[in-house]
Image (cartoon, rainbow, N blue to C red):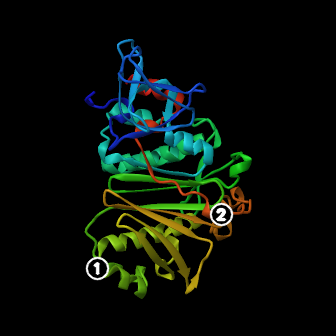
């Protein structure tokens, strides 16, 4: 069947959405949207599917159209978003929200803002004069809370208290963490059309996004080393890749812009034009316990970092006390997830989704 205009979770998605089969008895896939149409196949629980359309069937049930691993129609209630299932299973997360594609009404914005329990955090969102800046600030805070809720099995409204280091790295305070993610920590970044998040169950994590822009590179001579400038060679995209690496590195540590960027020298290894890995040396000494991965999403360079707990810089000590466990063997080289696209409505607690839809 020809696709119609997308609805529900697909309203703002740039491409097909990944969902996971959750029904214990599997998922029946049919040729048409009607429940009585011919059966195509049955998929087992845990199978990851790509879906490009959602609609009501003639019987009043929500149906989705699968395009991979097979084509056909299936019940929406037997499928859950893959990003949520994967976050719950591993605690290792890479999420991105396109705020440029989001035009909330005043009611929707106020509803989402009220989901942030800390008054200072809400005030920081509203201190921005430009609507786009407010959207970025709001989504970044909701991302942290949604991610913590799913990864740590916490009540998103009552059990999550976000604090920040002196260098402005967000962390959870007074939180009991599962045994398999004792060092769980999270980081966010926003620029241009994207807000991005990274979370790790054991390693320090940092993330940064650098949007396409006109950059006066001469004014930033003190931020890169001579070797890095030779690598840039006037290429703005390469400059942004290095800048994002430095941001992700210092944000993971906790000191942020308090670290002199030129003291950290990065070497990038590209895999095609869109992705790369990086290593870092500080004052000429390579740091073997750091990992960096970068992706280019619609011209935005997104970099996530992993590092050892021993690298924490926390002037007030509260964040360090939440990261007391040594890294398990292999934690630095655990599977590295790709960025998954979410919409702002995905960040709403499950129990409040109906209230938002009713606005």
Q: CA gap, disc 1 to disc 2? A: 40 Å
> Is residue 152 in sight in this rendering?
yes
Between 60 and 162, the one nearer to me in the picture: 60
Asked if residue 63 is positioned above or below residue 136 in the image, the reply reads above
Nearer to us of marks 1 and 2 is: 1
Q: Residue at x 28, y 27 (%)?
A: 1
Q: Residue furthest top?
A: 59
Q: Quadrant of residue 229?
A: bottom left
Q: Which of the 4 image quarters holds residue 139?
A: top left
Q: Is residue 331 above or below residue 143?
A: below
Q: Secondary structure at mark 2?
A: loop
- Left/right placement of residue 278 relative to residue 320 reads left
Picture coordinates of residue 289 (x, y %)? 62, 72
Using the rendered image of the protein, determine whether residue 118 is visible from the camera's viewpoint: no
In the image, taking residue 19 as reference, residue 133 lies left or right, namely left
Reading the image, the residue beneath label 1 is 234
Label 1, secondary structure: give it. Answer: loop
Which numbered disc covers residue 310?
A: none
Residue 316: give its label: 2
Q: Position of residue 288 (x, y in %)?
A: 61, 76
Question: Which is nearer the eye, 15 or 155?
Answer: 15
Q: Earlier in the sequence, mark 1 or mark 2?
A: 1
Q: Is residue 293 above or below residue 201?
A: below
Q: Judge left or right: residue 63 versus residue 289.
A: left
Q: Residues within 10 Å of mark 1 (few under 14, many from 20)?
A: few
Name the residue rendered at 61%, 59% in the picture: 334
Q: Position of residue 300 (x, y in %)?
A: 34, 60
Badge 2, how many Cα within 10 Å: few under 14, some, many 20+? few
Q: Quadrant of the C terminus?
A: top left
Q: Give coordinates of residue 332: x percent, y percent.
A: 62, 64
């Amino acid at each position: 069947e020809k696709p119609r205009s997308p609805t529900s979770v697909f309203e703002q998605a740039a491409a097909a959405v990944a969902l996971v089969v959750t029904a214990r008895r599997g998922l029946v896939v049919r040729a048409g949207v009607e429940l009585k149409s011919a059966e195509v196949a049955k998929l087992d629980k845990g199978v990851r599917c790509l879906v490009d359309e959602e609609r009501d069937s003639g019987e009043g049930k929500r149906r989705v159209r699968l395009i991979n691993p097979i084509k056909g129609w299936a019940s929406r209630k037997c499928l859950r978003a893959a990003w949520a299932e994967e976050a719950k299973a591993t605690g290792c997360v890479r999420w991105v929200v396109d705020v440029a594609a989001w035009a909330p009404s005043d009611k929707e914005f106020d509803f989402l803002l009220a989901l942030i329990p800390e008054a200072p955090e809400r005030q920081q969102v509203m201190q921005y004069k430009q609507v786009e800046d407010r959207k970025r600030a709001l989504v970044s805070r909701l991302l942290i809370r949604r991610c913590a809720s799913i990864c740590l099995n916490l009540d998103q409204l009552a059990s999550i208290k976000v604090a920040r280091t002196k260098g402005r790295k967000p962390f959870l305070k007074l939180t009991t963490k599962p045994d398999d993610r004792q060092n769980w920590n999270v980081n966010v970044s926003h620029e241009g059309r994207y807000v991005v998040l990274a979370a790790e169950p054991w390693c320090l994590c940092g993330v940064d996004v650098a949007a396409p822009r006109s950059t006066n590179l001469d004014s930033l001579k003190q931020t890169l080393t001579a070797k890095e400038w030779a690598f840039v060679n006037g290429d703005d995209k390469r400059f942004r890749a290095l800048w994002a690496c430095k941001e992700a590195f210092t944000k993971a540590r906790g000191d942020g812009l308090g670290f002199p960027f030129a003291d950290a020298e990065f070497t990038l290894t590209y895999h095609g034009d869109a992705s790369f890995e990086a290593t870092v040396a500080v004052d000429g000494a390579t740091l073997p316990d750091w990992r960096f991965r970068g992706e280019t999403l619609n011209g935005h360079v997104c970099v996530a970092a992993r590092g050892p707990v021993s690298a924490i810089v926390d002037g007030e000590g509260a964040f360090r006390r939440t990261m007391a466990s040594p890294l398990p063997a292999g934690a630095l080289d655990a599977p590295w997830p790709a960025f998954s696209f979410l919409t702002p409505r995905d960040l709403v607690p499950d129990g409040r989704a109906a209230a938002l839809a009713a606005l």
